[in-house]
Image (cartoon, helix red, strand yellow):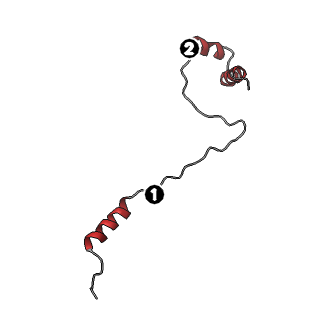
Amino acid sequence: MARRPTNPRDAAEAAFKAATTKAPERVREAVAIPGRREQVTLRIDSEVLEWFQKEGPGWQDRMADALRKVAGK
């Protein structure tokens, strides 16, 4: 019976692999929440932006309503 039943090189490689291997990332599925908003970057013409902003605060909601109406929602 050998004192070291495993090859030291194999043991070192296995230890290195275990220490450097990343755990698989957990994939999150989007949860459907009614009325949920998502932040996006959107480029629009300055005239369009000014038209929505001229009414004051709440322009983002007005823009979202207009887009929702065009989308048929």
Image quarter in which the C terminus is found: top right
Question: In this rendering, would 39 be left or right of 65?
Answer: left
Q: Secondary structure at mark 2?
A: loop
Q: What is the residue that sits farthest to the front in this orientation?
A: 1
Q: Which is nearer the eye, 43 or 5?
A: 5
Q: Label 1 crowding class (10 Å Cα cut-off): few <14, some 14-19, many 20+?
A: few
60 is higher (above) or lower (below) than 22 = above
Question: In this rendering, would 20 be left or right of 36?
Answer: left
Q: Secondary structure at mark 1?
A: loop
**Residue type, numbered disc 1:** Ala
The residue under label 2 is 45
The residue under label 1 is 23
Q: Which is nearer the eye, 64 or 53?
A: 64
Residue 48: give x, y in percent of width and height: 61, 13
Image quarter in which the N terminus is found: bottom left
Residue 33: give x, y in percent of width and height: 70, 41
Residue 28: give x, y in percent of width and height: 58, 48
Write the residue at 66% across / 44% down: 31
Write the residue at 69% across / 15% down: 55
Quadrant of the rendered image containing residue 63: top right
